[in-house]
Image (spheres, rainbow, N blue to C red):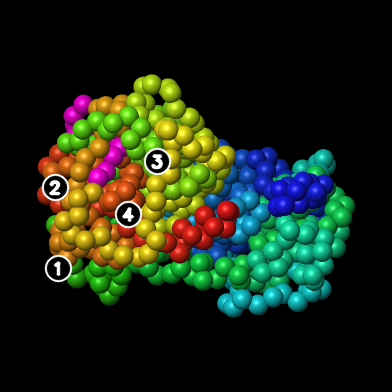
Amino acid sequence: MVFTCLLLFAALLPCLSHSASVNVGIVNGTEAEPHSRPYMVSLQENGKHHCGGFLVSESFVMSAAHCWNNGANLTVVIGAHDLDNYNYYRIPVKFYHIYPGYRRLYNDIMLLQLEKPAQRSKTVEWISIPKTNKDVEANTICSVAGWGKISSEGPLSSRLLEADVSVIETKKCKSDWGQYFSESNMLCAGSGRGFCQGDSGGPLVCNNIAVGVVSFFESGNCDKPTVPNVYTKISQFLPWIKEIINEKSRVFEEEHLLLDVRTGSACGELTSPTMLHIIFSLTEVNLHSPYSTMALISLLLLAALLPQLGHSASVNVGIVNGTEAKPHSRPYMVSLQVGTQHFCGGFLVSEQFVMTAAHCQNHGMNLTVVIGAHDLDNYNYYRIPVKFYHVYPGYRRLYNDIMLLELEKPAQRSRTVERISIPKTNKDVKANTICSVAGWGKISSEGPSSSRLLEADVSVIETKKCKSDWGQYFSESNMLCAGSGHGFCQGDSGGPLVCNNIAVGVVSFFESGNCDKPTVPNVYTKISQFLPWIKEIINDLQ
């Protein structure tokens, strides 16, 4: 029935309004006074304008989730008016926080965490967002701005354009857009002016407050649309926004201690050491007050145990002290690949979703899911592109290291392809339970590799022991650990810890540079702790 309705509404199929073109602007708008909107951001890919956005704090930009575009590596440009005049600042994106329930038109909102804080100036400032979830009254005159096209086929402008628009009654929006419009999560505006390709992610501003995010419009018709433009309603997402932009998850230098520790490369193709930047939250280690000498010394001593994220970009890799799995005895296992090279593990939890570690997303890298594989040198397997990356919104480096990948098409069950069950309730795994881990990661820190899937039995370790060994790196509620002389290494990240045929953990991190004889146990993300979020993502689609 849903499919039939979608076909019937095809004539109104909305076009996501992002663009990879430069020199673009608002429909029927006028040039904004230079730097009168100092919160405006140009999101750029390879030096070209791609989407709009806006500063909501010194370290966060808000934009549309569809602007991330399955792994595009974006740069934030602040302080700009004329994109042909390079008198502006460029800041790399550190993390992409995509709303977990995002799918195409729905919940189209994203927060970009900046590599370094934006400095306030005459040309750079952030804008306020609503404090409570309240509707904007119909007929309110608001404004929209951007560097998007000025018409569907018309000329372009490199300068920031702006236009006044009138908020339209929710019932009218629903009547015009039908099932595409969510009355709770969207709002719409029009009046003969509005946005076009390239304006996505910009703000709808009412009374100097950003109340909406530019999302979608009538396909191919920016000039004289028969239906109003649609915006994501920011106030509906306040709990999620506050969770991301709170003291615990911000990455400001004054609130965190940044240690640069030289480690072996996490990517097997890179043989020289690389600088791994790990951020330790001062709130997590009770250092919110001014640093004490003892606290600093403790952190430096703990640096010897600095965990290394276990992902790898090399091929031909496998589990430490393991044995070759019987071919296709673990039909849920997935190889996540960059190009054609193995990068991380994963596992099917439904025909449409793969679970893996959030750090495998690696700042916008475009992954392909390989299912039905045993020997990666034997190409008798299936490749499925990733449609959407659902990174847990509270993810930050080691913490909440979990992600769901939505597949471009459903995986077909077969002898070599099957999903695995996950826990139904949030319950701890008992200490000393014998479980197993599998993957195509390195077989030792410096040793040979195998293209075939390896597996090993591991014993779950008591939570108190894990906490004692790992200190502030270990979360007793969100992690579990296991060992016994077997375990994982680079390239195994994202694979499952399986106990009694149920995936209970996701491979996350281990002792830096020591896969062979670790002095501390391997750490997994505890799946059952994230069941509400997992169900929200999977059930929303299915």
Whether tag 4 and tag 2 are in contact, CB under 8 A, the answer is: no
Closer to the chain start, of discs 1 and 4, is: 1
Nearer to me, 502 or 467: 502
Q: Residue at x 30, y 28 (%)?
A: 452
Tell me which amino acid carries mark 4. Answer: Val
Closer to the chain start, of discs 4 and 2, is: 2
Mark 4 lies on residue = 504
Whether tag 1 and tag 3 are in contact, CB under 8 A, the answer is: no
Kindly report which numbered mark, 2 or 3, lies closer to the viewer in this rendering: 3
Closer to the chain start, of discs 1 and 3, is: 1
- With respect to residue 373, does 181 lie above or below? below
The residue carrying pointer 3 sits among few (fewer than 14), some (14 to 19) or many (20 or more) residues within 10 Å by Cα, namely many
Query: Start and end of the magenta stretch?
Result: 436-448
Left or right of 18, for residue 425:
left
Mark 1 lies on residue = 294
Residue that protrudes farthest toward the front in the picture? 415
Closer to the chain start, of discs 2 and 1, is: 1
Q: Residue at x 85, y 63 (%)?
A: 191
Tell me which amino acid carries mark 1. Answer: Met
Kindly indicate the quadrant of the structure image that contains residue 262. Answer: top left
Spatial CA distance of label 2 from label 1 is 33 Å
Tell me which amino acid carries mark 3. Answer: Tyr
Kindly report which numbered mark, 2 or 1, lies closer to the viewer in this rendering: 2
Mark 3 lies on residue = 332
Q: Residue at x 20, y 43 (%)?
A: 457
